[in-house]
Image (cartoon, rainbow, N blue to C red):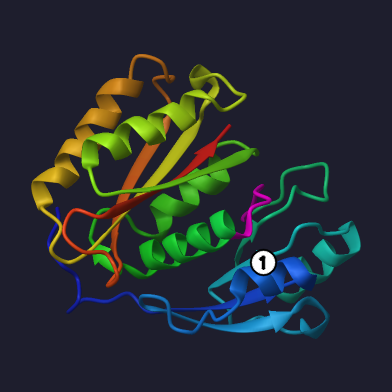
Amino acid sequence: MFEPIFEEQNDYFCSLIIKGEFGNKVVNNLASPIGNVDFNILKLEEVTDLSDNVITFVIADNLTETEWVKIRSATSSTIFVIGCASPVQEPQADSCFICETSPELCIQTLISMMKMIGGYGHVMTDFTDIRRVLIECGQQKHVIYIESTHPEEAIERVLNQLSNKPIALDQVKGILLNMVIGEDFEFSNIYTIIDTIIARIEEEVSETTLVIFGTTFDVNKQGQELGLNMIVSY
C-alpha cells in the first residue's frame, strides 16, 4: 500500500489559469513540473483553446459568470477552481470550487492536489479518488493546513480545526487528506495518523462519508516534519 512509485510515475498535463493580483500572489515563483504534473500558467484573458488539457486549475478570488463560461467553453477537462465561490447557481459537471481566501492555503492545496494526482509519493490515491471526493461529494469546500514535527500534535490540531468549521461533522460528505512528508519519515507514523483520525471521526460523520487519504513527498521536510492538508466537502 505504501510502496514508492518513483519508477511508475503518472504523467499529466494541465493549465493553471490565474486572475488578477490574487492569482499572481498564489503562483508567485511556482515552476513546472510539480511532482509528475507538467503545467503552463495562463492569465484569464489569455485563455482560448485548452482542448489538450487533462485537468485545468483556476486560481482566482472571484469569477464572473461570463469568465466562468469562457473557461468552461475552452476545455472539456475536469476543472478545479481554488480561491473563490462558484459564480453559478447550479452545480457544474466535472468541476468544483474550493473556497479559500488565504493565498498560503491556496498554494498548499494546489501543490498537494497536483502531487496526489501525479502520484508523487506513495500509492494511496489516484485521480478518480480525488475527483470523487471533490466533485461528487457536496458543493461547499473548506481547507485546513497545518505543519508539525510531532504526529500526535498534528492529529490534534487538524481535528480541532475540523471540529471548529461551521458545518457539523454529520453533514460532511467527503474528506480528502494529504500527508506531506520527507523521504525519511517513519512509515509507522503514517498508519498511526490514518488510524487515529478515522477512529476519532467515524462516530460523528455519516456512514456514507467518503474519506480518502494520500501521502506525498516534500524534499524540504526532514525527519518527522509533516504537513496535513485537508479538503472537506459538505
Q: What is the magenta range?
A: 94-103
| Residue at image mark 1 | 58
Going by the image, does 54 lie left or right of 72?
A: left
- Does the magenta-highlighted stretch encompass residue 181? no
Q: Quadrant of residue 90?
A: top right
User: In this picture, is 72 found above or below 212?
Assistant: below
User: In this picture, is 164 found above or below 8?
Assistant: above
Q: Give me the residue at 60% from left, 41% from top.
A: 141
Question: In the rendered structure, which amino acid carries the disc numbered 1?
Answer: Val
> Element under label 1?
strand
Q: Residue furthest front?
A: 149
User: In this picture, is 1 found above or below 79?
Assistant: above
- Does the magenta-highlighted stretch encompass residue 97? yes
Q: Give me the residue at 68% from left, 55% from top.
A: 83
Viewer-closest of 229 and 80: 229
Q: Residue 185 placed where, x, y %? A: 15, 57
Q: Give me the residue at 36% from left, 78% from top.
A: 36
Viewer-closest of 82 and 145: 145
Going by the image, does 205 lie left or right of 154?
A: right
Note whether residue 76 is visible.
no
Q: Residue 218 placed where, x, y %? A: 30, 68
Going by the image, does 30 lie left or right of 62?
A: left
